[in-house]
Amino acid sequence: MEKQTTIASSCLFLLYIATFTVAEVLEAHHHLHQHNSHGSVKLFVFGDSYVDTGNIRKSVSPSWKEPYGITFPGRPAGRFSNGRVLTDYIASFLSIRSPVPYALRKFAKKSKLESGMNFAFGGTGVFDTLVSGPNLTTQIDFFEQLLQQKVYVKNDVVNSSIALVSIAGNDYAAHFGRPGHDTKDLAMFTKSIIKQLTVDLKRIHNLGVQKIAVTTIEPLGCLPGITSSLSYQNCNEFANMASMFHNQILLQKLEELNKETKNSAFVDLDLYNAFISAVKPQKHNQGYSTFQINTLKPCCVGVSNEYSCGSVDQTGAKKYIVCDNPDVSFFWDTVHPSQNGWHEVYAAIKPSLHQLYS
């Protein structure tokens, strides 16, 4: 078991390497604009790299390097994928442009702020993690400051806002990555994460957001950073059990919060089973899958263990390999889904998104 968790800490989450190109990101967000058929709804996003669309700095992230963004928008633009990520698909569902990243707010036209804002930073968690970046509490601080500065009028937020919160995977990476961690402490650590997350969710709601979509965490044991040690053939069931325990407690808390608010303010988005359905199609989709046979294998990998997707050597030579067709890979790199992977996840959680309008 100790060997498994060591693999998890060394392979599961990479310290992402990322000054940002303002024009590139804003242009990418412009292309995601759609007619808003639901009125002036605003989307406020909090979380990590699964929903970050350009907040993390170039100096600390490969999401600003080739080959990230090769499918959309055609060049690196801060997304941890070859193209669109979860935020983009949910914004599309709401018929709004993908919210402008918080880090780029001062460079965006006022009209582009009308769809909300993305406060998510890759590598972050509910608590501080191995990556230097604002944790969830600090991300909510940013949101509150904008309300205080009248960037968003609270009455407007109350009447037309939805929040997306997708976070916690990096908390487990940090836990397993710290020296002397004990797997026996995992249950206690999970409860501490959910306790703080509950406080944070209540705070978002008290700031005026009427509907809050909260993702369960993905099956950590199915991420390529772990399955690489198993030749991408099987998921690590111990890590998946950790995900299931986290999600079980999270869902219980969301149910309690909905009873407290009396208006079903909190909607769970089941990322865990959406991932499982995609990477284990023989068990969940009657043998059918839109992806390649080995769904656990990522499209983009380093040429050796010392490199990762986006790596170059001192001469600038590429030290990564990209598959011939990213469209048939569920995973883009060792942690993140491809654009098509996210589309598959979105299709699975779409029925739950309709609850945001109930």
Image (cartoon, rainbow, N blue to C red):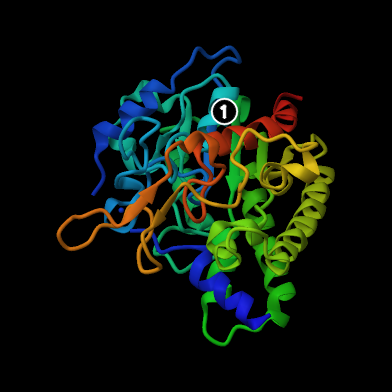
Q: Where is residue 20 in the image (x, y as percent from the top left)?
A: 26, 45
Q: Position of residue 7 (x, y in %)?
A: 56, 73
Question: Position of 289 compared to 263: left or right?
Answer: left
Please give the name of the residue rendered at 44% of the width and 19% of the height, measured from the top-left corner.
33
Q: Is residue 255 above or below residue 96?
A: below
Q: Residues within 10 Å of mark 1 (few under 14, many from 20)?
A: few
Quadrant housing the N terminus:
bottom right
In the picture as drawn, the residue positioned furthest to the bottom comes out as 180
Using the rendered image of the protein, determine whether residue 180 is visible from the camera's viewpoint: yes
Q: Where is residue 280 in the image (x, y as percent from the top left)?
A: 72, 47
Q: Position of residue 324 (x, y in %)?
A: 42, 39
Q: Quadrant of residue 209?
A: top right
Q: Which amino acid does label 1 sit on?
A: Asn
Please give the name of the residue rendered at 55% of the width and 57% of the height, measured from the top-left corner.
224
86 vs 253, nearest the viewer = 86
Please give the name of the residue rendered at 45% of the width and 24% of the height, measured from the top-left corner.
114
Q: In which quarter of the image is residue 22?
A: top left
Quadrant housing the C terminus:
top right
321 vs 106, nearest the viewer = 321
Q: Mark 1 points at which residue?
A: 155
Using the rendered image of the protein, determine whether residue 86 is visible from the camera's viewpoint: no
Question: Position of 114 compared to 253: left or right?
Answer: left
Q: In this view, does 260 lie above or below 116?
A: below
Question: Position of 327 compared to 70: left or right?
Answer: right
In the picture as drawn, the residue positioned furthest to the left comes out as 315
Q: How many labels does the image show?
A: 1
Q: In which quarter of the image is residue 67?
A: top left
- SS under mark 1: helix
